[in-house]
Amino acid sequence: MDDKQLGQLSKALGVGGKAQEHKKRELPVPDGDFFGLLDTVTDEQRGVALQVREFMHAEVAPIMNEYWNRDEFPRQMIDAMRPLDLLRKVWNEDGTRKADATVMEGLITLEACKVDVSTAVFFGVHAGLAFASVALGGSAEQKAEWLPKMLDLKAIGAFGLTEPEGGSQVSQGMRTTCRRDGDAWVLSGQKKWIGNSTFSDFTVIWARDEESNEVRGFIVRAGTPGYNVDKIQGKTALRIVENGLITLTDCRVPDSDRLQEVKGWRTTADVLRLTRAGVAWQGVGCAMGAYELAVKYSQDRRQFGKRIGEFQLIQNHLVHMLGNVTSMFTMCLRLSYMADHDLMHDEHAALAKVFTAARCRETVAAAREVFGGNGILLENGVAKHFADAEAIYSYEGTNEINTLVVGRAVTGLSAFV
């Protein structure tokens, strides 16, 4: 190269005579939405997302580390969340879903998870799994009793499906049973990992009918004799979520609290199908939050006399993370559109879960690496994302099970044993 060409190259790279001017310029605000995908949604959807973003930074971020350490859910957050009226952005008063419910729910989940995945899990259990169970499986009377209170966050729901000996296989090996006894049902068995159940007003319990072998759903109210919840202790992920081990010992539930419109496992599957996209969105939000923290840290942290963001290896980490986040965001936005237009099948949601969970795990690990030793300190934020990614990777269908769902769809051959 001649001197002129070298000068042009130096200018493009920000070195040489203009280096100091380059260093003094204002650094960009970390933003995981590199392709401006939020600009492609409706004004209402974007407005709700920004409301949730503001709420998370104002109400959740200041207290989340304290409650993480306490292994406890901040119940006062429910009152603070109520003015957002988020459930009515997804559900109609009669229990039907809004036309853009899945996209809206996804954006709410995204913004919550960027700060704290546990908050999104609380919302997803109540507004997704529990609410959908009543909306799809309840009678008109049951919906009239519970849905208004749930929409207002005046009654909190939980969803009891997973069992101590059955996660992935619970559809075929459900051990919790129910039997008719006069005008009531007697429930026996255990449910495990049930979010919100330590403080919920009711839990939807799914049980196998001893006589017909069909799956039935029940609204089990808090305080019902024979219904006991032990808080699961010692978690290393989602510590703010209060998961319960529910033990049902000859628990009598009146037939009026049996979900009257449940059509066996098919209704349970319909509930799960409605909410599965939301779990994929959790991976997007968790990864995006970790990425933005890593970018900010790279702009502030100095080693060897310069910001670590000026080192090539750090930039390589950040760019790889951003590629993951962008592809995850794009996939989930399309998945939610498909769900809202009745185009989504189980294998679509399964592929999104497989991809986002794996890429989230990879992204938060890279973010932790950018922080170096500081990455394991709770105060720096990325450690919580790193831990929570492990839960996202495992629940709502492990990546192995979801992989087999997709594999069956693309080959026409089942690899399930």
Image: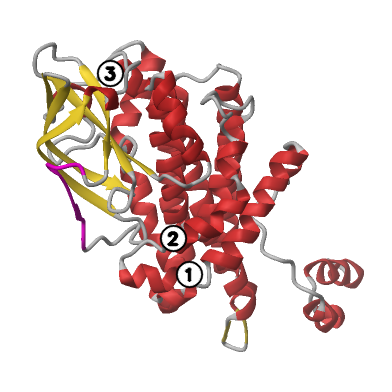
Which residue shows up at 73% across the image and 40% down it? 44
Q: Position of residue 254 (x, y in %)?
A: 21, 27
Work out how far the residue at label 3 is from the one at label 2, CA to CA, in angstroms: 34 Å
In magenta segment, residue 397? no
Residue at the location (41% across, 61% down)? 75
Asked whether the residues under the numbered discs 3 and 2 touch, taking CB atoms below 8 Å apart as contact, a structural biologist would say no
Whole-Å distance between the Cαs marked 2 and 1? 7 Å
- Residue marked by disc 2: 385
Q: Is residue 249 left or right of residue 318?
A: left
Amino acid at circle 3:
Trp
Question: Which is closer to the viewer, label 3 or label 1?
Answer: 3
Q: Which residue is mark 1?
A: 381
Q: Which three-letter amino acid code belongs to the residue tagged 2?
A: His
Q: Is residue 237 above or below residue 100?
A: below
Nearer-N-terminus badge (3/1): 3
| Amino acid on which disc 1 is placed | Gly
The mark closer to the camera, 3 or 2, is: 3
